[in-house]
Image (cartoon, rainbow, N blue to C red):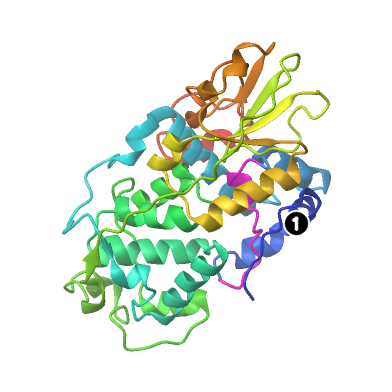
Amino acid sequence: MQPSFPTDHKSILERMRSIAPEQYAKTRNFSTGSVSYLSPYISRGVLTLPQIWNNLKERGYTIQTAAKFIQELAWREYFQRTWWHLGNKILQDIRQPQQDVLHHEIQKALTEAGTGIDAIDEGIRTLYETGYAHNHLRMYIAGLSCNLGKAHWKLPATWMYYHLLDGDIASNTLSWQWVAGSFSNKKYIANQDNINHYLNSNQKKTFLDTSYEEILKQPVPEALQNTWQPAFATILPDTAPPKIRTDLPVFLYNSYWLNPNWHTDLPANRLLILDPVHFQQYPVSKKVLDFILKLAVDCIPDIQVVKGSPQSIPELTEVPAIYSIEHPITAAYPGIKEPYPWLFPGFKGTPSSYFNFWKKVSYF
């Protein structure tokens, strides 16, 4: 059964309240496991990590009884804090250059769901249809592309981000670098037995049907040799000039911040900023853009969509105040930046590694 992602706030909250941390801990690595399907709402700022954690605490969970689930939320925060710390440097090899790179393209077998690994090809088709891929599948795809197909991680990561409803620059980029070995100590690859086990398949006699000792010693499989360099672009909708009440403050939303609870008690102008410069650097598919727009309209009453930067709206010079949330993509926004809602606000310093980060934050 393919996942679906409603855009009304009530359904999203119901999904959050249905999280089962015990089942998640036992089955999360399986494609049919009890995962939360909350990632698109977290990435878009509809739900925040503290909100999810507070809901679990209200239901009686502790950081011990919901440890595996909280650790996954912590991975997301670790990636975000790394982005905050490094900025655009995350778009380059971070810890060391990726090894054994043959090209900076992407395998056609990936984009056409024709790798010959049945469960992975089915997962890619599901990604195109739904905008979602299980975390294990993402790792399998990255391992195939970078470590067996010897592509540099950047273009394949761009391809995946383009199609993901939960596309997050930090989580996606740093996960690909982790698999490719430029943000970790070693490359990640899975063999056919591992894929069969977690993706509920029973395929044999593939180029992955070998031991871990031999899997990376083989030449690039024939299925992964045909590469290309696709172009990715986002066609933003033309929008009418927003109707700004200059006696009211302005709250600036974006594709990473669509929070329905943000100062709802205050009368204000509420604008969704679709900055062409941002989407030129980080393009998303029509499916993803439509999801973003639907979330905004369904979750935030009276929001107006603006194609352009905040600086392109002349009336903003006349309003009493402008608010946005602190975030790498809001750095050029005018006005007051409110604090980002961290899961572990007490953490200070540089997130040198996930292990060290978790060791520190698990005591908060």
Prevailing SS of the magenta stretch = loop
Position of residue 193 relative to residue 58, above or below, is: below
In the depicted view, which residue is nearer to us: 85 or 322?
Answer: 322
Residue at x-position 70% and y-position 57%: 21
Where residue 87 sits in the image (x, y, percent)?
Answer: 39, 30
Which residue is pictured at 49% across the width and 67% down the height? 128
The N terminus - image quarter: bottom right
Q: How far across and down, in percent of the image, does residue 273 sit?
A: 57, 33
Q: Secondary structure at mark 1?
A: helix
Extreme-front residue of the structure: 240
In the image, residue 270 sits, relative to residue 173, either above or below, namely above
Residue closest to the eye, 90 or 254:
254
Q: Which residues are magenta?
A: 31-45
Residue 221 picture location, percent across and down: 22, 76
The amino acid type found where label 1 is placed reads Arg
Say if residue 136 shows up in the picture: yes
As drawn, 89 above or below 117: above
Q: Is residue 138 left or right of residue 271?
A: left
Give the total of numbered labels: 1
The quarter holding residue 338 reads top right
**Horizontally, is 9 left or right of 118 in the view?**
right
The residue carrying mark 1 is 15
Which one is in front, 341 or 115? 115
Q: For mark 1, does the 10 Å Cα neighbourhood hold few (<14), some (14 to 19), or many (20 or more) residues?
A: some
